[in-house]
Amino acid sequence: MFNEIIVRHFSNPEFAAELDDATASIELGNPVCGDRISVQLKITDGHVRKARYQAWGCATSLAAGNVFCAHINDQPLAAIATSGAAIDSMLGELEPSQHHCLEMLEALFAELHKRAQ
Amino acid sequence: MPFDGYFDYNATTPVCDEAVQAQRLAETEFANPSAKYGLAKKTKEALALAREQVARLINSNSDEVAFTSGGTEANNWAIKGALAAQGAFGRRAEPAHVIVAQIEHASVLEAASYLERIFDCEVTRLKPDAEGKVSASAVAAALKSNTRLVSVMLVNNEVGTLQPVRQIAARLRERGIHFHVDGVQAVGKIPVDVRELGMDTMSFAAHKFYGPKGVGGLFVRRGVRLEPLLHGGGQEGGTRGGTEAVASIAAMGAAAEATQRMLPEMLLRLSRFRTILRGLLVERVPGVSFNGPENQDAQAPNTLSVRIAGVRAEALAALLDQMHGIQVSLGSACSNNKRAALSHVLLAMGLSEAAIRSTLRVSIGRYTREEDLHRFAEATAQCVRALQKIGNGVNHERAAIA
């Protein structure tokens, strides 16, 4: 079953789109599940102006892509969460079969911070 | 309509009114059916009636029907009980050879693995063809001098492929090899005549034919010897210990009778519905194709294994459920972080991982109406469009990178 956060994000993925003016992108995959998330970013002056994503995967990974973009869209890089605890709560309570999506979300944040440095 | 979004009749079926009523009536009688006093007359009669009703559904004698807790127990009993009765587990016994199809239910496959692990049995797991069928000649070719048991299902639960049970039975009868058939997905869905099919044992489960969960049974042909799986107080003619679940069994009997009455009409209706549904999906959903037999007479009429190229079925099923209240089953699902759970049936049929991940199992039944098919096709088309919008920019066929 899916928690309310996951349902909300996968049934209305408002950030699912492609960017024409992206300045950076992050691509992630889970080799076991075959899930893929591709995030396109427009970053200027240390600020994520736009974040959009595309994904192929289970419902939870589709939600994870949207959750990621929702958190970073139109945010200064310096204000974006880095702590594990903050990220861990973003997807709500997960079942064991959904945990790989949290790992993907953590990896997305880690990649973003790598780009920011 | 409470079941208008339900497209998972192969997983389980709603309990029919006849079964609910029989269960309520039987629940008011509490006496132990094994008791000798008059108070037990009604529960004894309830069991006898249910045995007759089930026997009529499969065209057996009522003394050939034994009640169990369901299909899993019946499969375990038949397999282990038939081998034990042949002395296959004795210390000095020659290791027995067992043949099962790769597309069997887990209760058969796991029982076979147990035999291999604990009793040194030799197990051959037959691969089906691309349509999900195991041929009688493949079974015959796998036979050895020490083959003691063959287990092949009558209808596969995931793709609905009918297996050539009659032909397999004929080959095995001449060699005196026990032939068990998992009939769980067939009984109540297609006409099943054990006389004509000729197997030695066949399992069935009430909840697949509009009866309650937790009850089922095993057909044991007259003259076939089985050791009990559950040793106990001599119930079921000494073949299965444990006080019978009278109310559930009565409900199963009522469900069997109702199913038998409706089956001819149901077969026609569901065949027509499947054709309609196939047509609607082809018309509205780009990239749709179907797994299983080309010839639809070789498939249970209520089952469609639907593949939608480029769409992850798991996400589609979640959207159908959350947005449209539609329930279907999957060819694969995330199980945990380390292991992919791909359908063993579709793998055995030779489907690629991408194809399996794009497969939905759609199964219809007694309460499906024609308008439900239209709603299903429309909802599917809508969800596929939504997923394509999310996934267009990702090449899912590319090897995943971290």
Image (cartoon, rainbow, N blue to C red):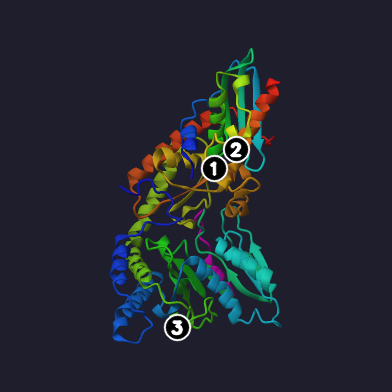
Image position, residue A88 (x, y; %): 58, 36
Q: CA distance from mark 3 to mark 2?
A: 55 Å
Residues packed near mark 1 inside 10 Å, few (<14), some (14 to 19) or many (20 plus) = some
Q: Are marks 2 and 1 in contact (CB under 8 Å)?
A: yes
Q: CA distance from mark 1 to mark 3?
A: 49 Å
Residue that badge 1 annotates: A94
- Which residue occupies 44% across, 80% down? B236
Q: Residue furthest top?
A: A45
Is residue B137 visible in the rendered image? The answer is no
**Is label 2 in a helix, a strand or a loop?**
helix
Disc number for residue A102: 2
Dot 2 amino acid type: Leu
Dot 3 amino acid type: Gly
Residues packed near mark 2 inside 10 Å, few (<14), some (14 to 19) or many (20 plus) = many
Vertical comparison of B281 with B7: above or below: above
Q: CA distance from mark 2 to mark 1?
A: 9 Å
Q: Disc 1: which chain?
A: A
**Mark 1 or mark 3, whichever is nearer to me:** 1
Disc number for residue B334: none
Is B250 left, or right, of B383 in this rendering? left
**Is label 1 in a helix, a strand or a loop?**
loop
Q: Residue A82: name its quadrant.
A: top right
Q: Are marks 2 and 1 on the same chain?
A: yes
Is residue A85 visible in the rendered image? The answer is yes
Q: Is residue A110 magenta?
A: no
Disc number for residue B237: 3
Dot 1 amino acid type: Leu
